[in-house]
Image (cartoon, helix red, strand yellow):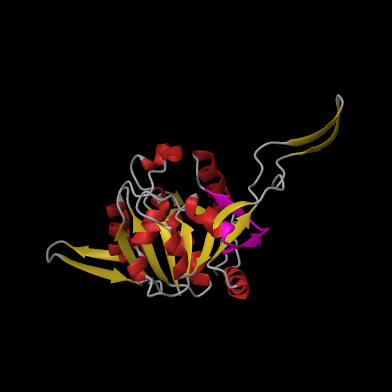
Amino acid sequence: MKAVLLAGGLGTRISEETVVRPKPMIEIGGMPVLWHILKIYSHYGINDFIICLGYKGYMIKEYFANYFLHMSDVTFDLSTNKLEVHHKHAEPWRVTLVDTGDTTQTGGRLKRVAPYLDGDTFFFTYGDGLADINLDAELALHREKGMLATMCAAQPPGRFGAIDIDGHRITRFEEKPAGDGTWINGGFFVLEPGALDYIENDATIWERDPLERLARDAQLSAYTHRGFWQPMDTLRDKIKLEELWQSGKAPWKVWP
């Protein structure tokens, strides 16, 4: 199976970082968040990726073009203009990088890579969200329900302390609860090729008309993920993810 990743947005809510690089290239633990996402999929045997490029997409192309340089010890012999790579560390990945336009919306980007999907079931996600999601379980549910699309439903982490009030008396306090009970789009999808028929053109936002119509047509199932889930939308989010990685307890690190 293949996995499609969106990596073309402007990332305006974390402009402190994205002014110089595309959002998926922001580093956590010295590695781009895009690398972390690919490692999650690779852990479940998904090693064929299609990445939808847009804003500063050339930086992602350069990263993969020079992957050995990033991951290995190298010797440059300037007198002979030769490069020797030591202790090559290779991932079992096949990465297709597709320019999908700087201003194309999320649905439009997905529609543009349809020719690379070979008409098969595929995974689809964003280039900025991390989770300890069980992709095998999500795929199994998708096949069991037989719908065109399956969405990971997640509960966002709380940012503030929650209280219950009776009159003027606080009866319960909980610091930063896991969520308020609301399920949201967790960003990890399993899709059938027919789901792309719900996308009209480059201006189509995947999270609006396509998902709304799929839900109305009873073609959208939910895989409920109750574990760790964290988008990297803001600098606060990046700092939190970095702290988790440096602690050695990053929940999304499901690979050895």
Which residue is nearer to you in this view: 155 or 236?
Answer: 155
Q: Which residue is drawn at 51% across and 45% down?
A: 238
Residue 26 position in % (x across, y down): 42, 49
- Residue lying at the far front in this picture: please name it: 217
Q: Which residue is drawn at 35% across and 54% down?
A: 201
Could you say which quadrant of the image residue 254 lies in?
bottom right
Part of the protein shown in magenta: 215-231
| Relative to 248, residue 156 above or below | above
Residue 106 position in % (x across, y down): 41, 52
| Relative to 24, residue 146 above or below | below
Q: Residue at x 46, y 53 (%)?
A: 206
Asked if residue 251 can be seen in this view, the reply is no
Residue 209 position in % (x across, y down): 48, 51
Residue 46 position in % (x across, y down): 47, 72
Residue 205 part of the magenta segment: no
Could you say which quadrant of the image residue 95 lies in?
bottom left
Which residue is nearer to you in this view: 64 or 249?
Answer: 64
